[in-house]
Image (spheres, helix red, strand yellow):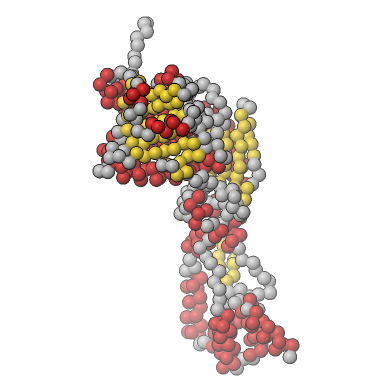
Amino acid sequence: MKIKQSPPYAPLLIESMRSLGYSFDTAIADLIDNSVSAQAKNINILLDPSDDPQLIIFDDGNGMDSASLEEALRFGSRGPLESRSEFDLGRFGLGLKSASLSQCRRLIVASKHDGKVCCFSWDLDEVEKTGDWSVLEYANDEISQLPSIDLFDSVNSGTYVLLQNFDRIAASSHDVKKTLDTLIETAEDHLSLVFHRIISEDRVSIAINGRPIEPKDPFLENHKSTQRLREQSISIDDNKITLQPYILPHRNKLSRDDLKKVGGSDDLRTNQGFYIYRCKRLIIWGTWFRLLSKEELNKLARVKVDIPNSLDEIWSIDVKKSTANLPDKIRKNLYGSIKESVFGSKKVIEYRGKLHRNEDISYIWQRLTERDGGVTYSINRDLPQIQLLTNSLNQTGQRVLEALLKNVEENFPSSSLYLDVADGEISTVIKDSQKILDEFEVQLSFAEQLGLSRDELIGMLVKTEPYASNEEIKSKHNNRQEQ
Ligand SMILES: Nc1ncnc2c1ncn2[C@@H]1O[C@H](COP(=O)(O)OP(=O)(O)OP(=O)(O)O)[C@@H](O)[C@H]1O
Ligand SMILES: [Mg+2]
């Protein structure tokens, strides 16, 4: 056997690497990761409004000297097995190149360190021409021609990432600038969620064209009705994973702004589940990892899971930092934690729909538990109103009335009611008091026509829904009894 070299052909491998599956959002987030890892305090995403749009990501982090920048531009600049500092969001030594070039053909990176600015670039047209892994180094006069390069004037150190020639967007859009504008808008949503903890802790401010992004907390921790359940932790080889379950407030208690933060009312259900944070950066969310199904009744449950970057391997973190697999080692512990939160979520929803029954009142609807555990609702035939009507009818009339009551029972809109209650759509109907008094009178005069005692009927009706809760009727009746 003898060793033969089998180097990859640069233009083809880079072209394939462009298809790792980055979206515009995940690509920008990967570049922001680098700035956060470089301890930037301010990151600005700037869309240059020229006809051939270009995007700049500028940070005031540690920056790089020329040798470090040249190394940083190498594909696989750091090995995935290398251990990283506690706050380093990187893992593969690829993101800067793979994320940028997934969106555009030219990546230019300039960096300032110790007062000096250096600059290198990857240009895919150049790679095609040379057929080699060749980067371009910029001379000082070339650096000074770069758009908004004077951003460096106001910082001691920092990094400037310029993306040019958005070929993929151009291939699918007539107006690259307009499409980029839209993409930036949706990226804002993504970044405000993915980096919400890092922004909230004042570690960094991320701005788009100078406007800071507001953090979007998916647990509404500052809402007074959010329930924070018991925190739990799991240790794996001296690494700690913490789990913090939350129950969101019921939808009725959420303002429009709150709803936006938790992903919108329609998405409450789809966004339930685990929220996995790696070094406080959200990587995956809205999944129960098939430990549980996404039921309507679980929809207020969310579990914040914090994992350190030292466990990347067991979670199978991907290059884009947008997927992770649940390690078998912690599957059981996670299940224990969700049981508690999901149970709580159900309680919030069920509580809202619960009827507080009073033994002394005859209700219109009766709840019956069947032998198989199922529940049915039927109309209480003993209500004085129904008795009164039944007694006034002949046999055919009684059969028609019974058929009508049965129809109402059998066509009870249970599924739609269930969803509406869970969604908080059902509002308490404020009954018009005068209308109830009028109805009450109609019943009484009907009873009198039938030759029945008015007082006796009043005695029965005041213990019956809906009259039992009407204060005016109750006091009138009590006064009459006292007289
Ligand atoms: N904005 C930046 N400021 C300072 N250094 C940076 C910046 N961006 C990248 N670097 C340096 O370049 C290196 C390569 O970055 P790249 O994103 O390609 O890989 P990574 O961050 O190490 O890992 P990953 O592929 O997981 O993102 C980083 O490790 C870091 O040292
Ligand atoms: Mg990176």
Instruction: Compare residues 398 and 408 and report the one nearer the observer.
Output: 408
User: x and y percent of residue 182 in the render?
Assistant: 35, 45
User: Which residue is more in the foreground, 366 or 159?
Assistant: 159
Q: Quadrant of residue 44?
A: top left
Image check: 39 left or right of 71? right
In this rendering, the answer to whether 380 lies above or below 332 is below
| Residue closest to the far top | 1
- Residue 387 in view: no
Question: Which is more toward the observer, 124 or 348?
Answer: 124
* Residue at 41% from the left image edge and 42% from the top image edge: 209
Up the image or down, 121 lies above or below 2; here it is below
Q: Does 197 appear above or below 130?
A: below
Q: How far from the left and from the top, in percent, is residue 269?
A: 49, 51
Quadrant that contains the C terminus: bottom right
Residue 105 in view: yes
- The location of residue 410, given as percent across then percent down, is 49, 69
Q: Nearer the viewer, residue 229 or 119?
A: 119
In the image, farthest residue toward the right: 482
Tell me residue 430's x, y (percent).
55, 73
Q: Is residue 302 above or below residue 451?
A: above
Q: Residue at x 60, y 82 (%)?
A: 384
In percent of the image, x 43 and y 42: which residue is there? Answer: 210
Quadrant in the picture for residue 338: top right
**Quadrant occupied by the N terminus:** top left
